[in-house]
Amino acid sequence: MKLKQLEGYLGEVASFKDPKIQLEQYPTTAHLASRVLYTAETAYGDISDKAVVDLGCGCGMLSIAAAMMGASSVVGIDIDSDALAAAQDNMGALEVEDTVELVRADLCHRPADSDALELNQQQFSGMRQKFDTAVLNPPFGTKPGNKGIDVLFLQAACLMARDAVYSLHKSSTREHLIKKVQSWGYECEVLAELKFDIPMMYKFHKKKTVDVQVDLLRIVLRGAS
Amino acid sequence: MRLITHNMLKCHVKNCKNPDKQFPLQFKDVKLEQIEAERNDEFLVRMLPRLDWSALLKTTKELGIVIPEKVPANPADDDEFLQALHTAILEMHVKEGSMICNGCGHEYKITKGIPNMLLAEHEI
């Protein structure tokens, strides 16, 4: 499939009807999703015939894009039932129900005696190393109480996948994230700098659209111990 | 939800620690639907070592889906085996029902094909 064609199809993916700010529900655009999955497949062969997991799948944009680029099996995971219902509608509309399925789960939790979020390791203990590739556009952790959630999502992705992780992050957090990934023993590179155009969707947004500079990170797990 | 994914789900209620009972989760009152999918032999063979075969066997028996008791020596050359595996793990979708933990009895509901693995605060 050509990039333009993929982006065109993904234009049909409907976004959040009633986005929840606490979950940092910003839609992944067709523009972004098509570039992430097209690159992962054409440059690295990480999608076609692979088992793919999408963490914080929201309305299913990256999951659907993975299916369209030839993934054999895709699992989208999200905490929010409204987002998952929207994802399911989109899977039907884009005819990928034979490839994509959804699970409602919480990757992180806050222990009663702590302010900091932690990985909910028990929740996905059975999913460790069960996928080839992970794709994600995680919450950036900019809302109060969500600090560090981007790193936790990335860590969960590294635990579930065997070969590679593709993840979108604020460019301003690049050095911090690369250091984290290296501390886990993996190689990490910035594949592209992209613009994440966030439309005016929450009341606190003053401008019509805001462009946020994001990095597409690729983490290589293959051959890592 | 398909069985390839059910094969990865364990009970994660706090203090539910018996590995023989928290997995596999036992289906209850399920509505199954078969959705045809393209068979990919290379993919199936690659996924085989990642599956917990005894758990898959137990679950398929409960659901009345037939797969061979044992993985053949050369699965890649066994058309019949691959077809049964493909149907069982990638085509059969559990649309409604629930999954029960044999250890603590927790019930995970499946609604419109989506299993809900969230727990209440005191169960984490």
Image: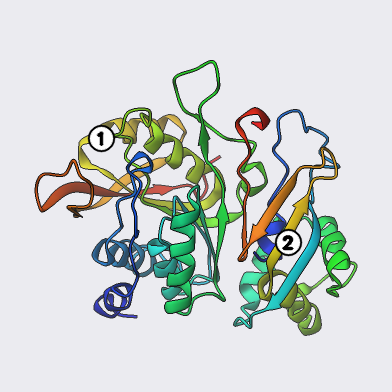
Is residue A46 visible from the viewing direction of this image?
Answer: no
Position of B43 compared to A202: left or right? right
Position of A107 compared to A90: left or right? right
When asked about the image quadrant of residue B104, the answer is top right
- Per the image, the residue denoted by label 1 is A173
For the point 47% across and 80% down, the residue is: A95
Mark 2: few, some, or many residues within 10 Å (few <14, many ≥20)? Answer: many
Mark 1–mark 2 Cα distance, whole angstroms, equals 43 Å
Q: Chain of mark 2?
A: B
* Helix, strand or loop at mark 2: strand
Mark 1: few, some, or many residues within 10 Å (few <14, many ≥20)? Answer: few
Where is residue B34 drawn, in percent x and y? Answer: 69, 79
When asked about the image quadrant of residue A22, the answer is top left
Q: Amino acid at mark 1?
A: Thr
Q: Is residue A105 above or below residue A179?
A: below
Which label was assigned to residue B97?
2
Q: Chain of mark 1?
A: A
If the image is split into quadrants, where does the C terminus of chain B sit?
Answer: top right
Where is residue A172 drawn, in percent x and y? Answer: 20, 36
For the point 83% across and 74% down, the residue is: B65
- Comparing A2 with A68, the one in front is A68
Where is residue A56 drawn, in percent x and y? Answer: 44, 50
For the point 80% across and 83% down, the residue is: B80
- Comparing B50 with A81, the one in front is A81
Q: Is residue A102 above or below residue B33?
A: above
